Amino acid sequence: MATAMAATAAERAVLEEEFRWLLHDEVHAVLRQLQDILKEASLRFTLPCSGTGTEGPAKQENFILGSCSTDQVKGVLTLQGDALSQADVNLKIPRNNQLLHFAFREDKQWKLQQIQDARNHVSQAIYLLANRDESYQFRTGAEVLKLMDAVMLQLTRARNRLTTPATLTLPEIAASGLTIPLVWVSGSQAWCRKLPGAPGRVWKPQSIGWGMGSPRRFCLAPYPTCLPGPHPQRMFAPALPSDLLVNVYINLNKLCLTVYQLHALQPNSTKNFRPAGGAVLHSPGAMFEWGSQRLEVSHVHKVECVIPWLNDALVFFTVSLQLCQQLKDKISVFSSYWSYRPF
């Protein structure tokens, strides 16, 4: 009996020594490895021009849009860090083979919130790790588990922002700023979207070839405020036709551009109007209401391009999450040797 107790005490002493080594040495080795990997991931988002490995102005990259199923949409998108700095798109209208061309205004950029959010989550994970440098002494396993949970939460959020595009309703896409202004002409007046700080006015159009759906909020505004010209939220030149919606998003390692062609439903239409809910990609036949106007999607064109450094970032996220889980598993193994949690 005494021999068995001595053996148990000896085993316990060995386990405690191994656990101290794990806390004082291996944990910091894993943290260093995690920081190195995440710094590499962070550099993928900044893409410095200097080649020095430090963060700097993001370089511009051109990506050719394409699809194996359609040639209705062709174009080039220019990505600079987390923003589209240029877009040059050609759209062939199926019904009449008309070719439309639209591009970003030179003074406009479109922020890709998914990339910005993913980068911010990576930066937060690096910050959490940096606060536990070599001089910091972990006293309990629970402390390590808490840190790993916090880091994994940031990494999971970063990965999810790239792998799970937002599900938007068609009115949300219409109001995104990438497509507006949307102007609906009714008789001798035209209603336009209320801009922050814009005075309220109504203007009388001369000859207007765009516009659909009266917006939820109205303003009376002179012609230059409502229509193409100095409109602060207008992205494209020339302005998008009124029957088009455009959406841009990230899906995994791909930059996707979707163009929706719309047509207005007549008030006496026999179609059962059912507004579509949120979706990453809406299908033809999807309906929505914009002000007092009911609209339906007639055609959907989706093109995409692969962004190699986003694929690198996703790999770094996966490897980092695996390292965090492995360290958690090593810490947790010691709890199996005791009926209570001494760590």
Image (spheres, rainbow, N blue to C red):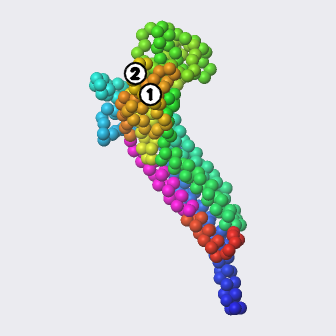
- Dot 1 crowding, Cα within 10 Å, few <14, some 14–19, many 20+: some
Q: Is residue 255 above or below residue 18?
A: above
Q: Is residue 202 magenta?
A: no
Between 123 and 71, the one lying in front of the other is 71
Between 242 and 318, the one lying in front of the other is 242
Between 205 and 264, the one lying in front of the other is 264
Whether tag 2 and tag 1 are in contact, CB under 8 A, the answer is yes
Q: Is residue 146 above or below residue 55?
A: below
Magenta segment: 305-325
Where does the N terminus fall, quadrant-wise? Answer: bottom right
| Residue 294 in the image, given as x and y percentages of width and height | 45, 23
| Residue 75 in the image, given as x and y percentages of width and height | 36, 33
What secondary structure prevails in the magenta region? helix
- Quadrant in the rendering for residue 23: bottom right
Between 267 and 54, the one lying in front of the other is 267
Q: CA distance from mark 2 to mark 1?
A: 9 Å
Q: Is residue 57 left or right of residue 287?
A: right
Q: Looking at the rendered structure, which numbered label has been put on residue 269?
A: 2
User: Which residue is under mark 1?
Assistant: 273
How many marks can you see? 2
Q: Residue at point 54% right, 41% down?
A: 116
Q: Residue at point 53% right, 39% down?
A: 113
**Amino acid type at image mark 1:** Phe
| Residue 58 in the image, given as x and y percentages of width and height | 50, 41
- Dot 2 crowding, Cα within 10 Å, few <14, some 14–19, many 20+: few
Q: Residue at point 59% right, 51% down?
A: 154
Residue 106 visible at all? no
| Residue 39 in the image, given as x and y percentages of width and height | 55, 53
**Amino acid type at image mark 2:** Ser
Q: Residue at point 70% right, 87% down?
A: 5
Secondary structure of residue under mark 2: loop
